[in-house]
Image (tube, rainbow, N blue to C red):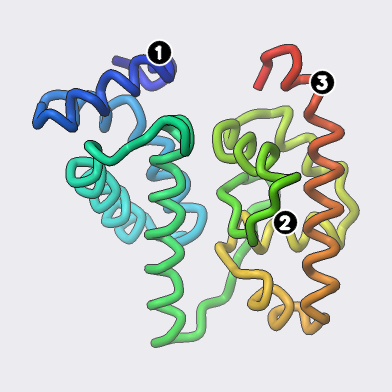
Amino acid sequence: MAPSAASNLDLLDLIRRIASGDQAALGALYDATARQVFGVAKRILRDDSDAEEVTMAVYLEVWRRAKDYEVQRGLPMSWLLMMARSRAIDSFRTRRKDQHVRIELAENDIGCAALEPSESLQGIEQLLLEAQQGDLVRKAIQTLSPDQRQVIELTFFGGLTNQEVADYLAVPLGTVKGRIRLALQHLRRRLEPAMRKGWL
């Protein structure tokens, strides 16, 4: 099953088979989704070997947790990418304790959200998770103001919490939260037409 051909139904079927102990299904899930999982980890960690380690850990976790998966809590790809994000950020923070890590931002990349939950903005965060390679998303990000784009890059791409962004930029925490909220609201307005048409 090629990554581009894997639908949510395909992935759901694989997860159900994994839950019943089907090792071949785990291999098929890896083949269909590993590129995206690795991409999320790489954007946060900026290191191939660390990203590969996180990727393998994600699929080990899938093997262990497949029986607990509930589609109501998120589509299969979102579930995988959130695991990748969580493990990559944990790895990133562990490394930061031992050495000073300079965060290098890639303007045209898109990663995963590291934001406090917001009921009204969960849809756009979900979209960014599932459409991380999309030209429409990248173009929408480029329409943000420089300040808004900077905080989105630091949280989505750098894996920082709001407080860490505030410390990094030497601005109040409330300023960071306000910029993130305005940025996500702007992105929602820009992307809603494409979402309604099913392009994302």
Nearer-the-camera pick, 64 or 92: 64
N-terminal-most mark, 2 or 1: 1
In the rendered structure, which amino acid carries the disc numbered 1? Answer: Ala
Q: Is residue 12 left or right of residue 177?
A: left
Q: Secondary structure at mark 2?
A: helix
Location of residue 51 with respect to 142 vertically, above or below: below
- The percent coordinates of residue 120 (x first, y second) are 75, 45
Helix, strand or loop under label 3: helix
Above or below: residue 164 compared with residue 54 = below
Query: Label 1: which residue?
Result: 5
The first of marks 2 and 3 along the sequence is: 2
Instruction: Determine the residue positioned at 26% across, 32% down.
Output: 30
Q: Dot 1, crowdedness within 10 Å: few (<14), some or many (≥20)?
A: few
Query: Under tag 1, what secondary structure?
Result: helix
Whole-percent x and y of residue 133?
58, 33
The residue singled out by tag 2 in the image is: 152
Determine contact: label 2, label 1, CB under 8 Å. no
Q: Quadrant of residue 194?
A: top right
- Mark closest to the chain's N terminus, 3 or 1: 1
- Mark 3, Cα crowd under 10 Å, few <14 / some 14-19 / many 20+, is few
Q: Which residue is mark 3?
A: 193
Question: Answer yes or no: do the residues labelled 3 and 1 have beta carbons within 8 Å?
Answer: no
Left or right side of 101 for 20 = left
Q: CA distance from mark 3 to mark 1?
A: 24 Å
